Image: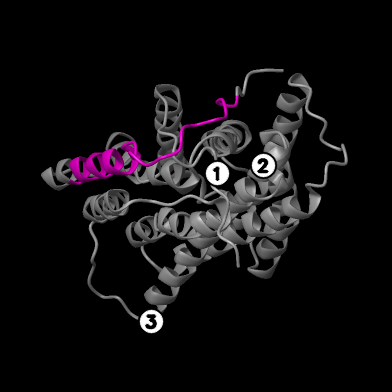
Amino acid sequence: MSAPQANPSAGRPLSAGAIALMLMLCLTWGFNQIAVKLVLPDIPPMLQAMIRSMGALPVLFIIGALRGVKFFERDGTWKAGLIAGLMFGVEFVLIFQGLRLTSASRAVVFLYTAPFFVALGSYQVLGERLGASQWLGLAVSFAGVALAIGVPQPNVDSHVLLGDLLIVGGAGLWAATTLVAKGTRLRFAAPEKALGYQVATSIPILGLAAWLFGESITHTPAPLSLGLMAFQAIWVVGTTFTLWFALVKAYSASKLSAFTFITPLFGVVGSYFIMHDTLSLTFGAAAVLVIAGLFLVNRPSPTAAAPRDALLNVTKT
């Protein structure tokens, strides 16, 4: 087997604009975990995920239409798009079912093993390679997340371990979807189209899962739940996921994925202000570890190839 060709974006450090976007995305995704929990009393998880995908699809079409995206043009991306969509749908099934068995704190930590899967797959699929200091940065950031959430925990039985494995499986599919989006013809599609494949394919998958697990909406959701569902569909899935795929096309997938370590930290802070959870000095130490790890991961490599492609302008029509 021949060595993978180097990806022109592999050695590129994140620009100030890309870092600002990633911070905004992580803040949104951290709050989204709280939003999901707040809606659960009114709408069960599989139905919640299906409804937000259904709501996000027209948002993608509107944004894409404004940018002149040709969603139904034959460009050879449908096979990769279908594969990414299948993984996208099953990913949420595994994560939400894992949450039924394991604790939320353990689930958050195991979900953010995704950057390791991205880093492991990036060399073979994308031609990206992390140096020793960058691997150390991933490890340090993950240690910070574990410290912030409070792992390890006692009373771990076989059910909890099964839940952990399901969450890790979801993390692996999250990473695989990122690699497919960047390592196949899907990278030539507009971000709206790339995400549209996934959102559309996930709807029947999540609907089938909701039916298999006997989920139903037994009463009219409260106005807060309806507002949070709109937030998830329009902003989280329809907008921030599109921005994520635009960034993945322009920058190193492993470095961008490493930035998602910040998400659970934002979730903890959001829980403090919204759900009145308690913060401790441990969180401060965890934040230092995450920031230090991200510095190591994103430090320019002296052997990195000079970037040849320009940042994808997500606002250009």
Task: Tell me which corner region of the image, top left, top right, bottom left or bottom right, holds residue 287.
Answer: top left
At mark 2, the secondary structure is helix
Callout 1 environment at 10 Å: few (<14), some (14 to 19), or many (20+)? many
Callout 3 environment at 10 Å: few (<14), some (14 to 19), or many (20+)? few
Q: Is residue 299 magenta?
A: yes
Q: Taking 292 as reference, is 175 left or right?
A: right
At mark 3, the secondary structure is helix
Q: Which residues are magenta?
A: 286-312
Q: Distance from label 1 to label 3 (Cα)?
A: 42 Å
Instruction: Give x and y (percent) for residue 5.
Output: 58, 51
Q: Amino acid at mark 1?
A: Asn
In this view, the residue in front, 137 or 242, is: 137
Give the mark count.
3
Residue found at the far left of this picture: 281
Q: Amino acid at mark 3?
A: Ser
Marks 2 and 3, the one that precedes in the sequence: 3
Q: Are marks 2 and 3 in contact (CB under 8 Å)?
A: no
Q: Which residue is mark 2?
A: 187
At mark 1, the secondary structure is loop
Q: Distance from label 1 to label 2 (Cα)?
A: 12 Å
Q: Nearer the viewer, mark 1 or mark 3?
A: 1
Q: Which residue is mark 1?
A: 7
Instruction: Give x and y (percent) for residue 160.
Output: 38, 74
Callout 2 environment at 10 Å: few (<14), some (14 to 19), or many (20+)? many
Marks 1 and 3, the one that precedes in the sequence: 1
Instruction: Give x and y (percent) for residue 167.
Output: 46, 64
Q: Amino acid at mark 2?
A: Arg
Instruction: Give x and y (percent) for residue 314.
Output: 61, 24
